[in-house]
Amino acid sequence: MNSPLSAPLKYVVYVFYAITVINVIGLLNEVKIIEQVTKPMLVPILALYYCSRKDRDSSYLLALLFSWAGNLMIMSIDFSTVLGGFISFWATLLLFSDHIIKRLKGNLLDQFKKKNSWIVASIFGLYLSGIILTVYKGAGMLTPAILFYGTTLTGTGFLSVLLWFEKKEKITLSLAFGMILLILSGSLLAVKLFVGNKYFIENITRMCYISAQFLICYYFINVVSNVNEKQMKNINYGSK
């Protein structure tokens, strides 16, 4: 049975829209107080919106918590705190990857045997290589850590695209687009930190991040749950 709060919580999405507009206006007009107050509100509002769903995925709520913590830490002027934010985002990506792998047919290695998988992997790999070449001079000794994080980020994107190939649905397309925007946001953040903070980079990074979070939330709100996905996946894969 739905919680009495489920219906009202569905309207929280309009609060998300309003806070997003206010945040972007503050960002574009360089009104720091508006931008910094509204930015940490976005992920908790999405979490409330997600709670309008009856059967909630605790791993997604945990991913939102890590994402929110990462968001707070990268707002710091202390570089070590910013790196802590990347670690928090990395935990978010692991949770997303785990969810996607459970919905794909076959195990992780089986994904590379699928049609077009190497083409998709090559595209993501080339993009990651381009970002590493862009930031390595500024990153110095941190380059291996950035490569490790970037591999996780693009790897999650790769898996989300394969999930869309496998299940041509609106929600899986939403997840794939969300992950691609998250990759763009994360790579631009690395450019901002290690190459230079240009005004347009900050704007695009924020817009990509907010859009990514909403699209991924849309997926998790609408995806079917309460089934033994691992068992169904293996049955379907073994029948081929």
Image: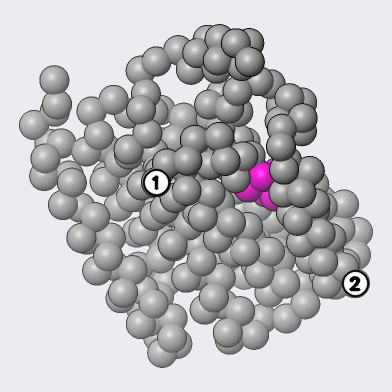
Task: State the residue in front, 149 or 123.
Answer: 123
Q: Position of residue 152 (x, y in %)?
A: 71, 44
Q: Nearer the viewer, residue 191 or 184?
A: 184
Q: Give how far apart the Cα atoms at labels 2 and 1 are.
A: 40 Å
**What is the magenta range?**
153-158
Q: Which residue is mark 1?
A: 170
**Disc 2 residue type (three-letter):** Lys
User: Residue at the bottom extreme?
Assistant: 29
Name the disc covering residue 137, or none. 2
Residue 32 occupies which quadrant of the picture? bottom left
Q: Dot 2: what SS?
A: helix
- Residue 193 visible from this viewpoint: no
Crowd tier of the residue under label 2, counting other residues whose Cα lies within 10 Å: few below 14, some 14–19, many 20 or above: few
Q: Main secondary structure of the magenta part?
A: helix
Does residue 56 lie above or below 74 as drawn? above
Residue drawn at x 11%, y 40% is 7
Quadrant where the C terminus sits is: top right
Q: Residue at x 36, y 58 (%)?
A: 42
Provide residue 135's location: percent of width, then percent of height: 82, 69
* Three-letter code, disc 1: Lys
Query: Which sits earlier in the primary sequence, circle 2 or circle 1?
Result: 2
Quadrant containing the N terminus is top left
39 is within the stretch colored magenta: no
Identify the residue shown where x is 87% and y is 52%. 144
Q: Tell which of 148 and 239 is nearer to you.
A: 239
